[in-house]
Each structure stands twice: as structure tokens, then as C-alpha cells.
Image (cartoon, rainbow, N blue to C red):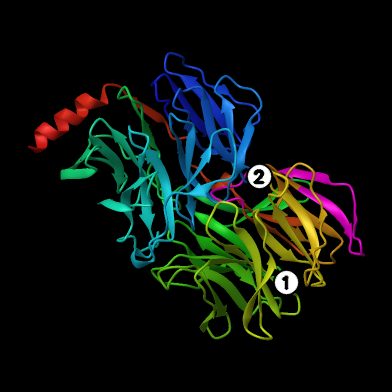
């Protein structure tokens, strides 16, 4: 992203197999400079004076000076979908499952400035971008499903929770000198817009740039424009491929599974014979027979189906889908009969994370309005009802049953960044912290005597556990560095010896270049004249 003064560019990148960090390059320099302390950073954006960079990492929104120094946490923030920073120090944050929220750049608790419109099947307000008056802003609204005809770029207000539709599109948008810029089918488009009357006019213009990198998972097109008319964008040919890779406990790569594809979440059956996974960006569920090398498609709808989790006996798969057009609900697929059943529906998004060893409960992430309202719920087959496992003002995600079903490992933002905890099941209110720096996506060894997790999305760690009351937690050891692909998902065999990683190693496309266009206003005028 280019700074407002048009003199600096910040971007997220990795050297070789290293974790992604933020880098800053001035326009008059050929060498970028790495910003320490920004491991795992994404979605950076600038302060209006071009001195600070806000970014998302470790379940928090942070800021750092462009010249370096220690990043500072602004607020807990998950799942984050873009942001912008106004001249009065207000930061807007977009979310999945929420309206746009605002928070002071000095820190604090975010509060909503837009509300989801159920009549328009809104499930998200994301990628807020301030207009010049600092009181209005652009954002992307809609159900964000595979059928994206209802997704729309809107204008909102800091004073009222308005949602005024402007342009049907499925990307972020930016204002520049009487135009709204957005991307459609990886083509940069420009639409005339009066920032005072908040009205569009004429038809959009397709601009003669190269194909622009577009993240079909989030709807984010990689482009930005400075106040002086300098445009920066990343070229791309669509969603990149990743590879499912077996890695030994020592970190040695063993072999790959299947062909490179845009893999999402992955889940091993308890016997290690099958892997269920989702494919991006439209998100469908597939199953792979590891021994026979046979792939079977599980879901084939126009909805977004994700987060497959196996039943303990390996005969069923629970997954999340928004096929009702609003919230993500829980469905179960029977691998023996190919029958599909709606398990749990409500007005809140539900993402399954674990199926209990006795088959009686399913844990899931429960998303409510606001950046800190990701709680843990569970479905009980005994009464076919939803129950709350943990609900706090913080983010709690990734809950996993222990092999005996009496404990749950989960991550929480109570002590930012996300830290790993274990707690009894059913809940008693007691909990014990496992990680010291950060901890996400826990997995248990089959005998319950070891717990695995990743730290800052860069390393897989192991910690011995004795599940007494209170539990005895041993010394954490680092197993190996990990280099995730499109999503930081993985699984481990019951003996704890082999790890299945959604690896960046399958992405053979190489780094996409950044393109700089100066005096972009001239190009806009020429394109308008040609159309007229």
C-alpha cells in the first residue's frame, strides 16, 4: 500500500521460506527495508501523515513507525477485513460477520458505525476507506457468497449507520479526485463520484492496467492510490496454488499429497486414511483417500462450504455453510450414503472445530457482532441443542477436545496476542495457560499426553501434558518452522510423528511484482475521453 504522500510503499512479503513480515520502500530507493516485530503481518494501511503503519497480526490490530521500532497493540481484532485511518486519529476496521467498527489510533475498545442489513442478506461490512471529509467512507457490504450478485460498494457515515449502495462489485474501493476505483474480474475500474452529494454518475470505465491480484477469499484487490495520484498495484493471475505436505516431527519434508490447489482447511480422519479439505475461493468440501489416491467431492452447491471436521469413527464430516443466504450453519455429510443433514441453524456464524471422541458433542467458533465476539459453543446430540462453552469479551477460537473428551484446548486473546489454554469439559470456569508468546490451532496427540500448536504462524511447537486436576504442563519445545499457504491450517497423526501442512511450497508462481503508475489522473482523463 502506498502512503498518502505518495513517497513510501509498505507491503507484506517473505524471503524464501521465511514467515511474511512488513517491508517499507521509499519511491526514490531501490531497496526495501524490513520492519522487525511484524511477523505474520497482513492488511497494512497508513496513518494520514504517512508516519505510522497499522497492520493485523496475532489476533490484534497493531501500529508501528515506518522507520521501525516495537509495534504497539491498538486493540484485539479478529477476524479482520481491512481498515483505514482518518486525520482525527480514528481508525475504521472491517470484519467478517459484523458491521464496520471504529477505534482510536491510541487504543481502546472498537464500537460499531454500521449495522448489517438483514434484508440485503449482509454478513459482512469490510474494507472501509475514508472519503476526504473524514466523516464518510466507502465499504463493501453483502452476503459474500459464491453467488455475489448482492455484494455492493456502499458509502457510510460516522454520524449515522447509513448503508447507501453505490456500485455492485465484490472488491475493496478507494476514492481519488472525483472517482471511485475498484476491481471487477481483475480489471481496475473507475466510476465518477461526487464526494459532497455522495452520488455516482455515468458508467464505470475499464482502465488499461495489467490484471490486478485479487484475493477471492476476502474480496481484496491489491491496489492503492496516494493523494498525489500515484497508483500502486500487484499484478496477478488469480488465486495461487498451495500443497498438502507431510512433514516429520523433526521438520523433514516427506512427501506431498495430490496436486497443488488453492487449499483451505484440512482435517485428517482419526485412522489417518483420509483427509477432508476445502478449496478456495468459492469453498467446496472434498475428501482424499490417501492410500488409493482417489479424490471425492463432498459438496457441490453455490454456497461457501468450509471447515470440515471428521466424526471419531470416520463415517461423517461436519462442515460450515452459508447456503441459507445469511449465517454460516452446521451441516453433516455421511460418507457411506452421501446424505447431507442440516445440524444447527441460527442467526450467528458457526465454524466447527472438533468432534468429541464419544461422538456426542461438536465444538464450534461462534461469531457475534464486534471484533472481540468470537466465542466457543457446542452442539449436543443428546438434546439436539446449542450450548455455550465459553463467552467472554475476548476472542476464543480453535477449540479441540482431548482424546478422553474431558478437556478442551483453545486460543484466547485475553492476554494478547492469542494464547493457548486448556480447560475442563463440561466447563467449570477453570482454565490454565499453555503458551507463553502466542498459540493457535491446537491439536492433541492420540493418547492425550502431548499438545501441538503454532506460534505466530511461524513454528509448530509441542508441549507434554498430564491431564490431572490441575493439569501438569511441561516445557514447550519447538519442532520445526512452518510455511503455510493461503490459510494457516494443518493436522497431525495420532502418534504425533507426522504433520500434514497446507504449505506454501506448492505455490510455484513466484513473487508477483508491484507496479507503480505516476500521474494516474492523466490516464483517467484519457480513458474518459476515449469512452465519450
Q: Label for residue 62?
A: none
Q: Secondary structure at mark 2?
A: loop
Q: Name the residue at 75% across, 44% down.
A: 480
Helix, strand or loop at label 1? It is loop
- Residue nearer the viewer, 290 or 491: 491
Left or right of 130 in this view: 347: right
- Determine the image quadrant of residue 177: top left
Identified at 54% across, 54% down, the residue is 370
- Give the residue at x 57% y 80%: 335
Residue under label 1: 271
State whether residue 170 is above or below residue 449.
above
* Label of residue 457 in the image: 2
What range is drawn magenta here? 461-488
Is label 2 or label 1 in front? Answer: 2
Residue placed at 37% from the left, 34% from the top?
A: 134
Compared with 106, 305 (above or below) is: below
Amino acid at each position: 500500500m502506498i502512503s498518502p504522500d505518495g513517497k513510501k510503499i509498505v507491503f507484506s512479503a517473505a524471503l524464501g521460506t521465511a514467515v511474511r513480515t512488513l517491508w517499507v520502500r521509499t519511491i526514490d530507493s531501490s531497496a526495501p527495508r524490513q520492519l522487525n516485530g511484524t511477523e505474520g503481518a497482513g492488511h497494512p494501511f497508513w496513518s494520514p501523515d504517512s508516519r505510522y503503519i497499522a497492520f493485523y497480526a496475532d489476533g490484534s490490530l497493531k501500529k508501528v513507525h515506518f522507520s521501525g521500532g516495537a509495534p504497539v497493540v491498538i486493540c484485539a481484532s479478529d477476524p479482520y477485513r481491512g481498515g483505514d485511518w482518518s486525520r482525527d486519529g480514528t481508525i475504521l476496521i472491517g470484519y467478517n460477520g459484523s458491521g464496520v467498527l471504529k477505534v482510536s489510533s491510541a487504543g481502546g475498545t472498537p464500537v460499531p458505525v454500521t449495522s448489517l442489513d438483514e434484508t440485503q442478506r449482509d454478513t459482512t461490512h469490510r474494507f472501509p476507506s475514508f472519503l476526504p471529509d473524514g466523516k464518510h467512507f466507502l465499504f463493501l457490504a453483502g452476503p459474500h457468497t459464491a453467488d455475489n450478485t448482492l455484494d455492493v460498494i456502499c458509502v457510510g457515515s460516522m454520524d449515522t449507520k447509513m448503508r447507501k449502495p453505490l456500485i455492485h462489485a465484490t472488491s475493496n474501493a478507494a476514492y481519488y479526485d472525483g472517482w471511485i476505483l475498484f476491481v471487477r474480474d481483475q480489471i481496475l475500474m473507475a466510476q465518477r463520484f461526487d464526494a459532497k452529494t455522495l452520488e455516482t454518475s455515468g458508467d464505470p470505465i475499464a482502465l488499461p492496467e495489467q490484471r490486478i491480484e485479487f484475493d477471492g477469499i476476502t474480496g481484496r484487490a491489491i491496489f492503492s492510490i496516494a493523494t498525489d495520484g500515484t497508483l500502486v498495484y500487484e499484478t496477478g493471475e488469480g488465486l495461487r496454488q498451495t500443497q498438502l505436505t507431510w512433514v516429520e516431527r523433526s521438520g523433514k519434508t516427506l512427501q506431498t499429497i495430490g496436486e497443488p490447489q488453492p487449499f483451505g482447511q484440512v482435517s485428517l480422519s482419526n485412522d489417518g486414511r483420509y483427509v477432508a479439505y476445502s478449496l478456495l475461493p468459492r469453498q467446496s468440501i472434498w475428501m482424499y483417500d490417501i492410500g488409493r489416491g482417489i479424490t471425492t467431492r463432498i459438496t457441490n452447491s453455490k454456497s461457501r462450504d468450509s471447515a470440515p471436521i471428521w466424526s471419531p469413527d470416520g463415517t461423517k464430516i461436519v462442515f460450515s455453510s452459508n447456503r441459507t443466504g445469511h449465517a454460516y450453519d452446521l451441516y453433516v455429510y455421511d460418507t457411506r450414503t452421501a446424505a447431507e443433514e442440516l445440524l444447527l441453524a441460527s442467526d450467528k456464524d458457526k465454524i466447527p472445530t472438533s468432534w468429541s471422541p464419544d461422538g456426542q458433542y461438536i465444538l464450534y467458533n461462534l461469531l457475534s457482532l464486534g471484533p472481540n465476539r468470537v466465542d466457543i459453543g457446542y452442539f449436543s446430540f443428546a438434546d439436539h441443542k446449542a450450548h455455550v462453552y465459553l463467552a467472554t469479551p475476548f476472542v476464543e477460537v480453535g477449540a479441540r477436545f482431548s482424546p478422553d473428551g474431558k478437556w478442551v484446548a483453545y486460543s484466547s486473546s485475553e492476554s494478547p496476542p492469542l494464547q493457548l489454554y486448556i480447560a475442563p469439559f463440561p466447563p467449570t470456569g477453570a482454565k490454565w495457560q499453555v503458551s507463553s508468546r502466542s498459540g493457535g490451532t491446537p491439536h492433541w496427540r492420540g493418547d492425550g499426553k502431548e499438545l501441538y500448536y503454532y506460534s505466530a504462524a511461524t513454528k509448530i511447537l509441542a508441549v507434554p501434558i498430564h491431564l490431572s486436576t490441575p493439569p501438569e504442563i511441561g516445557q514447550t519445545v519447538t519442532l520445526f518452522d512452518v510455511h503455510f499457504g493461503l490459510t494457516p491450517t494443518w493436522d497431525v497423526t495420532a502418534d504425533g510423528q507426522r504433520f500434514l501442512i497446507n504449505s506454501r511450497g506448492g505455490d510455484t508462481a513466484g513473487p508477483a511484482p508491484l507496479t507503480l503508475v505516476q500521474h494516474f489522473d492523466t490516464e483517467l482523463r484519457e480513458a474518459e475521453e476515449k469512452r465519450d
